[in-house]
Amino acid sequence: MRILLTNDDGINAPGLKVLETIAAELAGPEGEVWVVAPAFEQSGVAHCISYTHPMMIAEMGPRRWAAEGSPADCVMAGLHDVMKGARPDLVLSGVNRGNNSAENALYSGTLGGAMEAALQGLPAMALSQYYGPGNNAAVDPFEAAAVHGADVIRRVLAAMPADGDDYRLFYNINFPPVPAAQVKGTRVATQGFRRGTHYGVEPHLSPSGRRFLWVRGGNQQVRTGPGSDAAFNLDGYVSVTPMRADLTAHDALDALRVIE
C-alpha cells in the first residue's frame, strides 16, 4: 500500500510522528509512506487553499516534504508534484493535537486535508486525539491514537461502502481523552453540536499599546447529543464519522419548494 500523510500541526508535530508509525504498520514492508506536511502550523485553516499566491516546497528527507501552505495545499502538492504518476492508495491526515469532533470539524485543517483528498477521488481519513483530564498530563497524550489507530483504519477500510464519482466520502476519526487501555471500543457517530459553547475572540494590548484579538475556542468537555462524536469520545470511545464535502441541507429542500 502507498500512503500519503499530511497534518495541520506542521512537519515537526509529535502527532505526525504517531501517524507515520501507524501508516508504516498499514503499508507493510513492501509499502510506501510519503509525507507532505505544512512547514508551519496551519491549525484552523479548514479547507483553505493558496489560490492567489505560490507556495515553496522543500524535500526534508526520503519521501518527506514540507510545503509553505495549508493541509489541502499539501495534498495537492503530494498528488500532482511529489508523487506525480504514482498516486497513493490512501491519504491520512493528523494525528491532530486536540479533537476535531462537533463544530471543530468545520474549522479543522486536519479535516481540510482529508476533504481535499476525497475531492481528488482518493480514500481519506482525518485522525485527531482528544485532550482532557484523562490524558492532558500523560507522558504520551497520543497513546490512544498510537495503540488503536492502525486497527481502526483497517476496519474502516474493510467496511467502506461503494462510493460515487462526485462528492466522495472521507472519515473523521477522533480518539478519546483517555489512556489506550481505557478505550472502550469504536462507535460510528454523527457530527455533534456543543450547545452553549462557541469560538470567540479575546482582546489584548501589546506592550506598545496596540490592540490585538486572539481567537478562543469553547469548552471542549461539553457533551454533544446521544449518538454523536464528542459524546462518544467523552465516554471513552473512538468515534468514526463519515463525511462529504456536499454542503447542501437536503432536509430543507422540500420546505423551500414553495419559492419555485
Image (tube, helix red, strand yellow):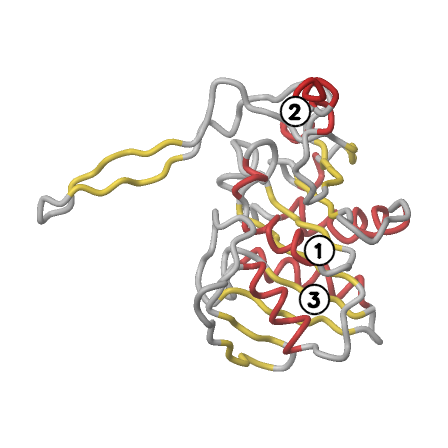
Label 2 belongs to which residue? 231
- Identify the image quadrant of residue 176: top right
- At a point 45% along the width and 58% down the height, the residue shown is 41
- Rendering coords of residue 152 (x, y %): 79, 46
Q: For the residues marked 1 and 2, what is the alpha-carbon distance in whole angstroms? A: 29 Å
Which amino acid type corresponds to the residue marked 1 in the rendered image? Leu
Q: How many marks?
A: 3
Query: Is 172 placed above or below 66 here?
Result: above
- Rendering coords of residue 216 (x, y %): 38, 35
Viewer-proximal residue, 177 or 259?
A: 259
The reply to whether callout 2 and callout 3 are in contact (CB within 8 Å) is no
Which amino acid type corresponds to the residue marked 2 in the rendered image? Ala
User: Which label sits on residue 119?
Assistant: 1
- At a point 51% along the width and 76% down the height, the residue shown is 57
The reply to whether callout 1 and callout 2 are in contact (CB within 8 Å) is no
User: Which label sits on residue 4?
Assistant: 3
- Rendering coords of residue 70 (x, y %): 51, 60
The reply to whether callout 3 and callout 1 are in contact (CB within 8 Å) is no
**Mark 2 or mark 3, whichever is nearer to me:** 3
- At a point 52% along the width and 66% down the height, the residue shown is 11
Mark 3, other Cα within 10 Å: few <14 / some 14–19 / many ≥20: many
Left or right of 10: which side holds 77?
right
Viewer-proximal residue, 214 or 61?
A: 214
Quadrant for the C terminus, please: top right
Circle 2: element type:
helix
Circle 3: element type:
strand
Viewer-proximal residue, 39 or 81?
A: 81
Left or right of 120: which side holds 103?
left
